[in-house]
Image (cartoon, helix red, strand yellow):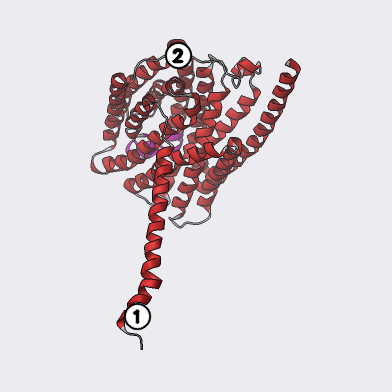
Amino acid sequence: MPDIYDIIITINKFIYKPGLELGFYILNMIKRAFNSYQESFKGLSKEVWWLALITFINRAGTMVLPFMSLYLTEDLHMSFSEVGWIMSSFGVGSLLGSWLGGKLTDKIGFYTVMFWSLLVTGFLFIGLQFITSFAGFAIGIFLTMTVADTFRPAMFVSLKAYSKPENQTRSLTLIRLAINLGFSFGPFLGGLIIATLSYSGLFWVDGLTCIAAIILMRIVLDRKQYKPKKTETNLESLNVVLSVYKDKLYWVFLAVIFLMGLIFLQLFTTIPLFYSEVHKLTEVQIGLILSLNGFLIFLIEMPLIHYIEKTLLDRMKIITWSLVLLALSFIVLNSTTWVGILIISMLLITVGEMLAFPFTNNFAMNRAPIGKEGRYMALYTMAFSLAHIFSAKTGMEIIDRFGYTANWFLMGGFGFLAVILMFLLRKMLKEESLEKEKKHLLHH
């Protein structure tokens, strides 16, 4: 019979030592992950970091948007149809604002547009809480979003001024990281504010954070003009396209963005209602699930984009797969009544979003000819704004007439239609590339 010493040796050999090695292995994995995360941020300018902080402050305050449909139905007692019209008004304002933002950015500069957009938006958000009628709120949200979304094309162009060309995708990803970190805080804090105070508190926070963001911008960001340089990759230098309205390939791309926005924006309209009505979740629980999206993007997106950029993976294939995931995220909601499916759906939306948004945005920025960056980015943001117009109204009407199940299948179908368009776009890009090579050979 073995004595106590033999037993200790055996335990040490088979349990303690492997356990110690496993511990060192896990620590090494954590260290490598941290180093990779740290590496993905290297080389970005201080102005881009300040822009990210300003964006975070602004986005953390946008607590009203995820709860807008709940506020309109529960506090103002509006019907689904009325909520759909108001969210469409939201989209029309966003559409007009994006177009104005692009035009103004090319004429007076991104800095001026960003400053006045944030300042006026802050006061408009504060004023929204005092409007309770259907017509009044529709007009109010239209005016608010018209002013608010002039910011977006200006901000995209500012990245060209404040970051090096090779860092643009990562700079954009950092801004998205700030947006999503703000979004991870926003819905959770918004749910707490609703539970402890009221919906009116959200409007105050929305407005004041816009004003706080613009004060910080004036203090830390120098006014800078974007001076484009001619490069071989620029469309104008290759004589491919001189007007965005004649760029057929870009319009197919915009159709993809519209469909992507159409389904993604359900996250802010019909999905919170689905959580509340079908799964009986509270505002705090809804806020927590929505916050999961922002938190995971904050944690994973930057290293993921850095890895993809280093490995030179095909960006257009990545966008295609991201659309497949977005489509599946809605279809799985019909597979079971188990509440855990909400988490699975949110994970699919999140991964799809992480893979789609940075590279679609980068494609739009790099597609623009010299001096027309504002117009190209305006159309990119307008595609989302157009999706805002139709997304909420379509979703609300389908739910009102046929139920949530029909809406999730419809949104999944739109997602797969976008996948088909991506295959067409990739074919057009190959043909365009061959045409460039022919012109280049003939020229030389």
Q: Residue at x 56, y 15 (%)?
A: 230
Q: Main secondary structure of the magenta part?
A: helix
User: Can the viewer see residue 255 in this picture?
Assistant: yes
| Mark 2 / mark 1, whichever is N-terminal | 1
Q: Position of residue 312 (x, y in %)?
A: 57, 37
Q: Which residues are magenta?
A: 65-84
306 to the left or right of 123: right
* Residue nearest the observer in this picture, 80 or 143: 143
The total number of labels drawn is: 2
User: Label 1 crowding class (10 Å Cα cut-off): few <14, some 14-19, many 20+?
Assistant: few
Which quadrant would residue 59 be assigned to in this image? top left
Q: Position of residue 147 (x, y in %)?
A: 39, 20
Under mark 1, the amino acid is Asp
Determine which residue is flagged by label 2.
104
Say what secondary structure mark 1 lies in.
Answer: helix
In the rendered image, residue 249 lying in the magenta stretch gets the answer no
In the rendered image, residue 76 lying in the magenta stretch gets the answer yes
The correct choice, above or below, for 170 with respect to 277 in the image is: above
Which label sits on residue 443? none
Q: Alpha-carbon distance for marks 2 and 1?
A: 81 Å
Outermost residue toward the top? Answer: 107
Q: Residue at x 30, y 27 (%)?
A: 207
Under mark 2, the amino acid is Leu
Q: Position of residue 360 (x, y in %)?
A: 54, 32
Which quadrant would residue 135 be assigned to in this image? top left
Q: Residue at x 48, y 18 (%)?
A: 102
Look at the image and tell me in which quarter the N terminus lies: bottom left
Determine which residue is flagged by label 1.
6
Q: Position of residue 332 (x, y in %)?
A: 53, 51
Outermost residue toward the right? Answer: 442
Outermost residue toward the left? Answer: 197
Say what secondary structure mark 2 lies in.
Answer: helix
